Amino acid sequence: MAESLRDILEAAARGVFPAADGGVTVVPQHGERDAGVIAFTAHSVVFTDEAEGWVRETLGALDCDPLAAAMHPRFLTALAARTGRAVDTVDVLLTGAPLPGRPEPALEEVADAGQPRVVS
């Protein structure tokens, strides 16, 4: 298994994913700002500077399917409290290499998307 979150994400971008074994990999945070969980198919990666023992103990204490434990609201809340963060939403991270050439559909800028998360 990879030694860092960067290794894991770079491998995923090449199409090499963690084993779909129901496991959890715990790696250090890349920087102070970033801590969290990334879920792959049947494998989660927790990236935090908290002790691995704390992560595994907290996951093991949940009364839920172990496969879903790292994304369970109680674990995310505990991780956020432990690291001084807040959980607002579960989001998605997509990664991949660019395809050659220009995209097929013409892209047009939208001046006012009406979306509160879009900041001009």
Image: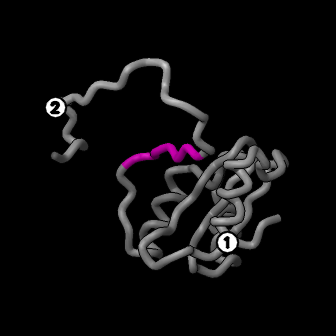
At label 2, the amino acid type is: Ala
**What label does residue 43 carry, if any?**
none
Visible residue check, residue 14: yes
Is-magenta flag for residue 29? no
Residue 51 occupies quadrant: bottom right
Check the image and report above or below for 27 versus 65. Answer: below
- Of tags 2 and 1, which is closer to the observer? 2
Placement of 106 over or under 3, stated as above or below: above
Q: Residue at x 63, y 49 (%)?
A: 39
Q: Which secondary structure dominates the residues rendered in magenta?
A: loop
Q: What is the spatial separation of the Cα atoms under label 2 and label 1, in whole angstroms?
A: 40 Å
Disc 1 target residue: 27
**Residue carrying label 2:** 111
Q: Residue at x 75, y 72 (%)?
A: 3
Left or right of 69 in this view: 116:
left
Span of residues in magenta: 89-95
Callout 1: 10 Å neighbours few (<14), some, many (20+)?
many
Residue farthest toward the front in the current orientation of the protein: 101
Q: Is tag 2's residue or tag 1's residue first in the polypeptide sequence?
A: 1
